[in-house]
Image (spheres, rainbow, N blue to C red):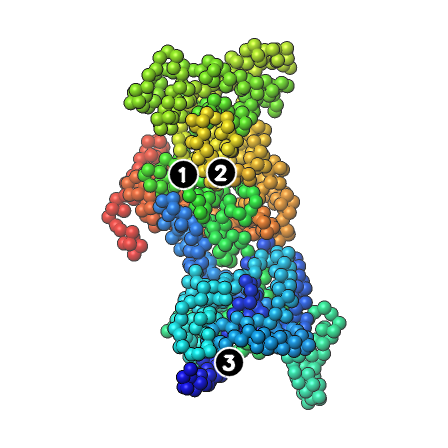
Amino acid sequence: MSIIDPVLDTIDGILSWLSTSLGQLAENYCELETADSRQTLVARDGSLVSILRIHGATFLVGPDEFERMHNGLTHTLQTCLARPGHAIQVFFMHDKETVKRELEYMLAPARQTAQQLNLSLDDLFSERVNELYRYCATESMYMVIWTRPSSLTQAQLEQSVKDRAERNKTSKIPPIRDAQNFLQGIPELRDGHESLVKSVVNDLNVLGLLTTLLDIHDACHAIRETVDPDFTDPKWKPSLPGDIIPIRETKNREGDISEVLWPPLANQLIPRDGEIVNLRTARLGDRLYGTVSIDLFPKEIAPFGTLFNRVLNAQIPWRISFLMEGGGLNALGLKSTISTILSFAHTNNRLIGNAIDLLRYLEVNTDDAIVRLQVTASTWAKVGEEKLLRMRVAELAKAIQGWGFCETAEISGDSYAGMMSSALGLSTKSVATASVAPLSDVTFMLPFTRPASPWATGAVLFRSVDGKPWPYQPGSTQQTTWIDLMYARPGSGKSVLSNAINLALCLSGGIQRLPNIAIVDIGPSSSGLVSLIKEALPPDKKHLAAYHRMRMRPEMAINPFDTQLGSRFPTPQERAFLVNFLTLLATPVGQESSYDGVSDMAGMVVDELYKSLTDGGNPRPFTANLEPKVDKIMAELALKVDSHTTWWEITDNLFKAGFTHEASIAQRYAMPLLADAASICRSQTVEDLYGSIKAPTGEPIINAFGRMISGAIREYPILSQPTAFDLGEARVVSLDLDEVAKTGGDAADRQTAIMYMLARYILARHYYLTEDVLKDLSPLYQEYHKKRILEIREDPKRIVFDEFHRTSKAKSVRDQVVVDMREGRKWKVQVALISQSLEDFDPIMVEFATSVFIMDAGPKQAIERSTKVFGLSDTAKLALETRVHGPRAGGATFLAQFSTKQGVNTQLITSTIGPIELWAFNTTAEDARIRNALYERIGAAETRKFLAMMYPNGSAAKVVEERMNVLKDKSGIIAEERANSIVEELINEIYELYKKNSITQIKT
């Protein structure tokens, strides 16, 4: 040890004391010393500190809800603030300038997934951020709980001091001058502090305030982000006890172990230098801050929403801190005695005395704690923009003054301390004048009415009506099941929202492949989504997204008897479907149910069909020239065939050779057909069991079954041939049933039911495969299906039924949907039903729903029914009546209710879709034609950007209509060919304009 070291230490100590006294060190403004546990920090005086993030309310807040929350919050804080020893800080921040960073964070998992899947969607992501930036601002709300040494009794405190001295003496730990003192915590405070924190978190969540207790690293990140957001990376973490100790420069002073411990916490939380610019302005980093404090408690207590709306109109960034401490009357000191003695001197002294007497009465005779309150609020601007800062401070001061008639002050002795007084969790020191008030009055003013989203990130970004970002991720672990109901009258934005949700599933964080999405559509509503995904995929993967319009034509033939590749028999789920399907076909038109015995007989017919065509039965013989692809591969492989060769043998040989797709094509010709069912029902086996049963018409039930199956073959030719319609490896598939699922009569209703069942089956039958089916397969196919089943089980799956009211008389379809709802969770299957009225859904479907989107209020009786069915509050009912509306400038506002693991969350939220995304999802015939034609000429991303600039409302239909009207005025009639030529002319005009002008020139 050098002789000069003690001298240097003394000089360092003096300089440190002087700097602290002059307020020049971070330590002077930050009382936090280190961490005590995973969720608790320690202050320099031994106080324990925990930080809670309050995400907001999980319901719409009206007068009744406000009163309940106010009473509950007052009761929750009553215990700790009824006596000295605890401090509570409630912090709120609203900043439009940082919202882009927050939006990017919310979309980050979706962007990563898009990169993983090679989806070119950068233009959509950028637009979402830029579009929401126009309407949104970052919001954060925290509650900081301080438990001070003064909460201990005098005896406990004295014993704690003795115990600490004994520990220090025993442990012989050297001095810690420039590091965190990890022994600073007072053990006697821990149990009481942890109990209080748990109680507050639980009470707030019970009240419907979504609250999480932050881990110490997240807590420190939240603090630093409020102090210096421009210098805080989203991934920054502090160095705390338990973490790897960073390497620091050592001074080699004997006896000092600071360099091998964790660096001081204050310097980590306040990373950059600051300065006092003048009495009203402080600088920290690249920002100038101005602070306003409340000098005089409001004359009329007003809720925080009043202040929020006033500041929102001013369009300024701001934050506010409410610091409450117990023992409020003690803060009055000698004022009470002096005002009583001098009451004769001035009426003001008498008024002060009366007010103090009232507070004492409330403290003694009511449950209302009297607390000490200090309120500070800050706003900021960039360095060099002091005039802007002065304007913002003036706006903030006016807003606070109008909030119940407060008196405010801007000048304090230390503007830097004023700025830090409004920061999160650094200290319990505040420059604000202390007020004394009943706790119930203080809680009335707190910001607990903001809306909360259970999702921190999401590929769908909604917003609250007043601009709080509201992420949503379908299929996430926040919900135990995923059943969506969406209803509204036409033109309310259902299709656009459904497409956005389906796209969000494709962008779910962490997935390795496109999810399986089966859309049973009426009309081209989902064609825009499929087109968007197809164009975003690389050329070798475009086949993974497909849109098909079903028609009663041979090329659309679908054999419902197809099995999994190589399987001679259907799986149990496939067999159940076939029994239900045959029963439906054998149900007389106009009747809700089949004849007695038909369902049982259908099961036997299915079994006999497959048994008759197995390798040991009478398998179908191979016939050349039916499938050129198969013939070509067979020739290349030099497969020998003769009159006894069967399609099953061809299938197996092609599969062995690695031609999986060609093997599946060959297998189609080995399958039973619907015509076989009409004949096998008359086999001796079936005849022995059902031959004596008569139908209500008097004919044998077998004859009735065969007759109706034969009728179905004539009516539905696509069911009577080997499958020609090939989905291939497509994972996002939409089947448009508009041409084959009509309404208007018993026959049409029956056809609709058949087509819905068939569509659902061919799109989603593989969703329910399990490893149990492997044992029924030939060993040749087991490894192939094992890998396939593992992928299917891992991947999210979704079944969407649009225009669900079309199935109102299709009991079999609705029964299958209910089964999907009941059992979907086991298979990671989501179900979405979209229709025009709540009446279109069965009560059991409504009961199972976990996400409900009410896109349009509808008539009064519809509002009453929605209110009753979903248990909406009067506030939600009023919002449904007055605030819900279809697409407008700024987006479509709707009422949503989500059942999550934290409980039910009901919110009024807005879906704001930009012109690029609107063009991507647009399904209007003219717009889709323009978009798809330009996709081929200039590429998908360029097309969307260019069309969005030319037609920012997301459609060119109005331009086409105007040109048609001009043509009609000239000729009186518009032929279809001429109408098509108008669209073609517009396409060419847009293309020529694109070639002549760059996008940058168009902007200018």
> Which residue shows up at 69% across the image and 85% down it?
337
Residue tagged 2? 793
Between the C-alphas of marks 3 and 1, the distance is: 61 Å
- Under mark 2, the amino acid is Arg
> Which residue shows up at 54% across the image and 21% down it?
582
**Label 2 residue SS:** helix
Residue tagged 1? 530
Residue tagged 3? 412
Which label sits on residue 998? none
- Nearer-N-terminus badge (3/1): 3
Between the C-alphas of marks 2 and 1, the distance is: 23 Å
Task: Give coordinates of residue 116: x percent, y percent.
Answer: 38, 46
Task: Give coordinates of residue 644: x percent, y percent.
Answer: 39, 12
* Residue 965 in sight here: no
- Quadrant location of the C terminus in the rendered image: bottom left
Task: Give coordinates of residue 585: x percent, y percent.
Answer: 54, 21
Marks 3 & 1, CB-CB < 8 Å contact:
no
- Under mark 3, the amino acid is Ser
- Quadrant location of the N terminus in the rendered image: bottom left
- Under mark 1, the amino acid is Val
